[in-house]
Amino acid sequence: MTIPVKNLAVAEAIAAAFVSQFASPATAGGDMGKGHGMAATGQNDWTASAGPTRAGRSKVDDRGNVRKLVPTGTCTTTTLPEGRMGSRAALDRALPG
């Protein structure tokens, strides 16, 4: 193998590893949707908080502006602790501040 071919192979391996880090279940072929207010502490896929990465940073269970990927159609039918329900849109509950 020549050096340019080795460099290309290494670059492809790095790119594949990078993409796999950010692939969500929805992009991996699952039928998933966004469920706001359903993530346990540190189990979120996204949050409205500022910062370079938002996944896994939620500090409060079922925070309203945090979302988690869930099977499509289950975000509004899943019962959470204290009788809470998930939502397709961000909620104003358990927000920091």
Image (cartoon, helix red, strand yellow):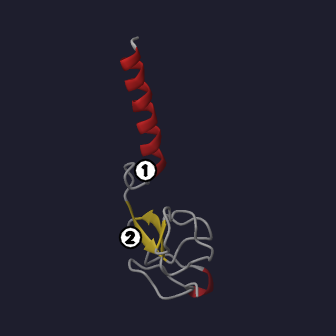
Camera-side residue of 8 and 40: 8
Left or right? Give the position of 2 relative to 54: left
Q: Mark 1 — residue?
A: 23
Q: Secondary structure at mark 1?
A: loop
In the rendered image, the quadrant that contains the C terminus is bottom right
User: Is residue 82 among what the camera can see?
Assistant: yes
Disc 2 versus disc 1: distance between alpha carbons?
21 Å
Crowd class of label 2 (few under 14; some 14 to 19; many from 20; radius 10 Å): some
Q: Seen from this angle, which residue lies furthest top?
A: 1
Q: Mark 2 — residue?
A: 73
Q: Residue at x 52, y 63 (%)?
A: 55
- Please name which of the two marks, 2 or 1, marks the residue nearer to the observer: 1
Instruction: List x then y, in percent, for residue 28.
Output: 39, 48
Camera-side residue of 49 and 95: 49
Three-letter residue code for mark 1: Ala
Q: Is residue 10 above or below residue 35?
A: above
Q: Seen from this angle, which residue lies furthest front?
A: 3
Crowd class of label 1 (few under 14; some 14 to 19; many from 20; radius 10 Å): few
Instruction: List x then y, in percent, for residue 12.
Output: 39, 31
Q: Earlier in the sequence, mark 2 or mark 1?
A: 1
Q: Secondary structure at mark 2?
A: loop
Three-letter residue code for mark 2: Gly
Q: Residue at x 43, y 50 (%)?
A: 23
User: Is residue 74 among what the camera can see?
Assistant: no
Instruction: List x then y, in percent, for residue 70.
Output: 46, 65
Q: Is residue 45 above or below residue 21?
A: below
Tally of numbered tags: 2
Q: Is residue 11 above or below residue 80?
A: above
Camera-side residue of 42 and 75: 42
Figure quadrant of residue 43: bottom right
